[in-house]
Amino acid sequence: MPLFLNDHGSSFYDFLVSRGQDLLRDAPQAGGHTPASGPQIHSSVPAFPHGTTVLAIRFQDGVLMAGDRQATEGFQVSGRRIEKVFRTDAHSAVAIAGAAGPAIELARLFQVELEHYEKLEGDVLSCEGKANKLGQMVRGNLPMAFQGLVAIPLFAGYDLKRREGRIFKYDVTGGRYEETEYYATGSGGKDARDTMKQLYRRGLTEVQVLRIALEALYNAAEDDIGTGGPDLVRGIYPTVKFIAVDGLRDVEESQIAAACRALIDERRERA
Amino acid sequence: MALPYYVSPEQMMADKAEYAKKGIAKGRSIVTMECADGVLLVADNPSASLHKISEMYDRIAFAGAGKYNEFEMLRKAGIRHADLKGYTYSREDVAAKSLANAYSQTIGSIFSADPKPLEVELLVVEVGQAEKPNELYRISFDGSIIDERGVAVIGGKSEALMTFLKSRWTSASISLREALRLSVDALDTVTNQKLGPEVLEVAVLDRTRPGRTFRRLAPGELRVLLNSP
């Protein structure tokens, strides 16, 4: 591999695009024909895995991000243990829903993008800067979205200047919208949002916010066929990450398992 | 039309080498050293924001001496190379050897083809993992590449520094603090002044850290390491 001496700026994504190596824009040409426009071409792409429900909630120390572990292909479960919440740097994470292939690639590329900028500039991007860059990358994915490969991330980060957690959601055109309390996306997103709407209040503690996240995912799994609930037989539980001033932290699986069991026991009593 | 003067290739190369050496001799020096915790890099650098030492990848660091704009361009190109490789294949496939080779090729071809050679000297160092030894590569202005053991030095006073360090550096099992003190002693001796933490740029590739091992040592931390008994 040669050295790239000419100035390419500080963005790894733009560097890839300038080299024509952008994996995100290299949309597979289904059946050898180029789609004109619109999502009517859906059926021409063979079945591929979809990620389902992910969410983010703000709490007193920062922001929580969580996701279930299931991937589906049509009416089939294609993966029980996939990861949908990715650490992108010390103070941010991306959760993905939709076409799993391009979405995971997007998260991986975004992680390299942030690290690349940090190394070249000797400085980390601001929280807002990260959110904007991710928006540009989502927009770059638009040609693939037209073929039905829609990959929409949810971004959560801790803003070191404002000293608070922040949540950004996106649309397929790269539109970027900030959420001030909570948000969930994916097939079970609506159900998760309904739960959070009932339970959310300001200044939640870590324990309370973890409970709300798991409850929202549980309800999503109950009402949405795509979302996977806690799997007690195989010991598969949702992934949860906290992002606060001292960085991003994975919640121990044992802690999540205990919280899930407590939740299920309560439901059993209610039934 | 006037014919250009004939200059023999030997003469041309000798002139270029002399020019590059002169440029590098004007600059300050950088010392790198293997120690128990990993690989230490110490630069005599009065600027707190214009760095001479930089992170390249998980286990790889870079240091440049000579002309700032030239080694900065090479530093950025190296990070692009490393990130592209890590993204295309896997993070563990990024190695100092291939980076050092790429630098050697690029600097060498600029030295022979361009009218002005690069006035830079580079260090590319990688901290080993488990049983794998550390790697220290020094790349000269003409693209020659030297695989160093234990200690490597670049910049203006590199020969005097190497003489000083050769007899004093004993083994890679010295602690980070010992290595830091030895490096600073060496820099103090050749520059004939006492270099305080505010004019030193220090970083370490910390063997024990998972993932990105590069860590800068802040002036406060340096003060503690240098002054404690």
Image (tube, grey):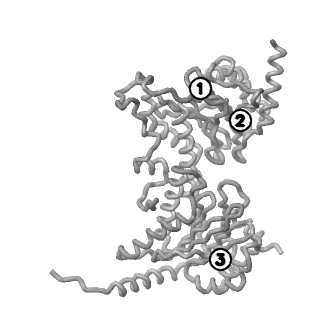
Q: Is residue A40 above or below residue B121?
A: above
Q: Residues within 10 Å of mark 2 (few under 14, many from 20)?
A: many
Q: Amino acid at mark 3?
A: Val
Three-letter amino acid code at disc 2? Val
Tag 1, which chain? A
Label of residue A240 in the image: 2
Q: Nearer the viewer, residue B220 or A42?
A: A42
Is residue B199 visible to us here?
A: no
Please provide percent x and percent y for residue A18.
40, 49
Mark 1: which amino acid?
Thr
Circle 2 SS class? strand
Q: Secondary structure at mark 3?
A: strand
Residue A206 sits above or below residue B226 on the image: above
Identity of the residue drawn at 37% across and 26% down: A37
**Mark in front: 2 vs 1:** 1
Location of residue B115 by image quarter: bottom left
Q: Does the residue at mark 3 contact the one at mark 2 (Cβ under 8 Å)? A: no
Q: Position of residue A143 (x, y in %)?
A: 41, 34
Vertical order, A262 against B23 (above or below)? above
* Mark 3, residue position: B151
Residue bearing the label numbered 1: A72
Instruction: Confirm whether circles 2 and 1 share one chain.
Output: yes
Indicate the position of residue B194 as horizontal and vertical percent values.
69, 81
Residue at horizontal 46 percent and vertical 54 percent from the top: A9
Q: Which dot, 3 or 1, sits closer to the camera?
A: 1
Q: Chain of mark 2?
A: A
A175 sits to left or right of A97: left
In front: label 3 or label 2: 3
Q: Locate the C terminus of chain A and report the quarter of the image it occupies.
A: top right
Judged from the image, the secondary structure of the residue bearing numbered disc 1 is strand
Sequence order check, earlier mark of 2 and 1: 1
